[in-house]
Image (tube, helix red, strand yellow):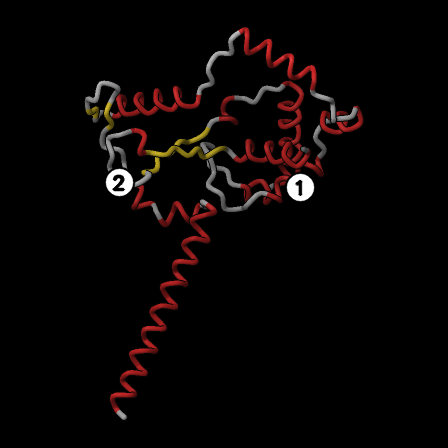
């Protein structure tokens, strides 16, 4: 009788441990996938442990000073993400293709797409964004714009419409903070083993949300 009770107790403890494990795993995935401020807060110590100690340059020499590490990473991602120049032949072929493409956007649709941003449209975009996403260089979250909408809403509307009309976004608004995340091993000297993510300012996200909802 005693052995059966002990067995039942061990079984219950095992089920409890399994429950707590899957509960913590679910919470971690739920928070981590959203890349929220809480996620970065939870991984703050991990970030400190994965500061890049050194990277190999194109000649295979290990560089450990901060300036060299920055230059190696910048050069690699610029060459990877920068578009190649378009040759005259490619340009001619592209123009021929576009001549055969039928227009599917009517003048009425174009008028709606090119109309100035309304306050209701902008407010809808602000409230549609996740509240706890990591802020960018200005450190202003979506919650800030929601809480003080009555004070800054009309000013934000003027800024967004100016960007929309001129096609130019001021550099401070378009700036971002780049983090390098290790793909596998924590300290690799190979720049290809690090994945960059960019934390953008909330104004940039709001403006992009307005355009995406229009489209």
Task: Give the residue displayed 21% in from the left and 24% down from the top.
Answer: 63
Q: Residues within 10 Å of mark 2 (few under 14, many from 20)?
A: some
Residue 118, above or below 14: above
Question: Which quadrant of the view contains residue 205?
Answer: top right
So how many labels did they put on this image? 2
Q: Locate the C terminus by quadrant.
A: top right
Q: Earlier in the sequence, mark 2 or mark 1?
A: 1
Q: Residue furthest top?
A: 88
Discs 2/1, front:
2
Question: Which quadrant of the view contains residue 37?
Answer: top left
Task: Give the residue displayed 57% in from the left and 10% down from the top.
Answer: 91
**Secondary structure at numbered mark 1:** helix
Q: Residues within 10 Å of mark 1 (few under 14, many from 20)?
A: some
Q: Is residue 96 left or right of residue 40?
A: right
x and y percentages locating residue 26 in the rendered image = 43, 58
Query: Which label number is shown at residue 124?
Result: 1
For this rendering, which residue is in front, 163 or 63? 63
Query: Which label number is shown at residue 186?
Result: 2
**Secondary structure at numbered mark 2:** loop
x and y percentages locating residue 53 in the rendered image = 23, 32
Residue 21, above or below 163: below
Q: Residue furthest bottom?
A: 1
x and y percentages locating residue 112 in the rendered image = 75, 29
Query: Which label number is shown at residue 146?
Result: none
């Amino acid at each position: 009788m005693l052995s059966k009770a002990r067995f039942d107790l061990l079984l219950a403890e095992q089920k409890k441990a399994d429950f707590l494990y899957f509960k913590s795993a679910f919470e971690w995935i739920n928070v981590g996938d959203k890349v929220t401020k809480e996620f970065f807060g939870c991984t703050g110590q991990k970030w400190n442990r994965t500061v890049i100690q050194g990277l190999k340059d194109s000649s295979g020499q290990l560089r450990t000073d901060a300036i060299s590490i920055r230059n190696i990473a910048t050069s690699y991602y610029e060459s990877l993400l920068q578009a190649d120049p378009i040759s005259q032949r490619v340009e001619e072929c592209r123009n021929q293709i576009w001549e055969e493409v039928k227009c599917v956007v009517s003048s009425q649709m174009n008028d709606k797409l090119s109309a100035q941003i309304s306050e209701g449209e902008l407010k809808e975009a602000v409230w549609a964004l996740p509240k706890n996403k990591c802020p960018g260089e200005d450190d202003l979250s979506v919650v800030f714009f929601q809480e003080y909408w009555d004070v800054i809403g009309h000013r934000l509307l003027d800024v967004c419409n100016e960007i929309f009309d001129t096609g130019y976004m001021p550099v401070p608004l378009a700036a971002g903070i780049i983090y390098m995340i290790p793909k596998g091993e924590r300290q690799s000297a190979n720049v290809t083993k690090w994945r960059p993510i960019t934390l953008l300012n909330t104004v940039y996200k709001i403006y992009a949300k307005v355009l995406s909802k229009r489209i």
